[in-house]
Image (tube, rainbow, N blue to C red):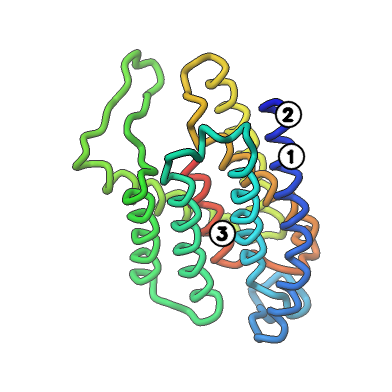
Amino acid sequence: MGLYPSYAVVVAIAVLTTYLLTFPVRRLAYRLGAVDHPGEHRVHAKPTPVIGGAAMFLAFGLTMLVASQLPEFAQVFKGSSEPLGVVAAAFVIYCVGLIDDVRDISAPAKVAGQVLAAMVLVFLGVTMYYFKLPFVPSLITLSPAMLPLITAAWVVGMANAVNLIDGLDGLAAGIVGIASAALCIYGLRLERLGDLGPDNLGPLVAAITFGVCVGFLPHNFHPARVFMGDGGALFLGLVMAAA
């Protein structure tokens, strides 16, 4: 199996697992009372589950596990702590959002949880070591002392950006799906040009994120039968930041 067919397989698994897992998550939400009730400032007409992000996170983790067994991604996983870092950080930030979905937490506590997730990324090696500005020929390299701060700012900014657009049915999942697909294609193009190593995790994370969004959208189109909640939105923001 070639590299591109392997990405297609990974995307298909992410789509299918997200779609199927959302059904039991919806049923569990009703049993737990994790639903958003209609109101003056709500667009939905009946109680709707708000923990759909659980299906997204579980599907992401399962797809990463499957990808780790494919020989085409051996360079990505072999001897690297980064895949574990992304999944662990995604779990932390999803739990933060889930707590906020079930019982409201203060904004400072929410940001603190997001910073904690960013520090998990840093600890396991998922950081932004350098970046490039438009029209500037040379790369800007970050000092080791700056890595935690820059990573935390990037994760918090991206997570809250996705959370803010999660206001209409299908909007956040649709936008992140398009963005992650573009990021995956861009990453694979950089690999072909030799500007990105074949051991880089970014394109794979972006591909799985795209699949997760596509699998969730049939449940989230208007009228939505489930919401991703803050947990799902923060999760999507983190994996986009990591990619």
Q: Which residue is mark 2?
A: 1
Q: Which residue is mark 1?
A: 9
Q: Which residue is mark 3?
A: 233
Three-letter code for the amino acid on which mark 3 is drawn: Ala
Three-letter code for the amino acid on which mark 2 is drawn: Met
On screen, residue 148 versus residue 99, left or right, reads: left
Rendering coords of residue 38 (x, y %)? 70, 79
CA separation, marks 2 and 1? 10 Å
Rendering coords of residue 62 (x, y %)? 64, 55
On screen, residue 194 versus residue 168, left or right, reads: left
236 or 58, which is in the foreground?
A: 58
Say if 51 sits above or below 132 in the image.
Answer: below
Q: Earlier in the sequence, mark 2 or mark 1?
A: 2
On screen, residue 41 versus residue 221, left or right, reads: left
Which residue appears at 47% of the width and 54% of the height? 159
Res 229 quadrant in image = bottom right
Q: Is residue 39 visible?
A: no
- Residue count near mark 1 (Cα–Cα under 10 Å), binned few <14, some 14–19, many ≥20: some
Which of label 2 and label 1 is nearer to you? 2
- Badge number at residue 154: none
Contact flag, marks 3 and 2 (Cβ < 8 Å) = no
Please tell me whether mark 1 sits on a helix, a strand or a loop.
Answer: helix
Please tell me whether mark 2 sits on a helix, a strand or a loop.
Answer: loop
Say if 181 sits above or below 37 in the image.
Answer: above
Rendering coords of residue 26 (x, y %)? 74, 73
Which of label 3 and label 1 is nearer to you? 1
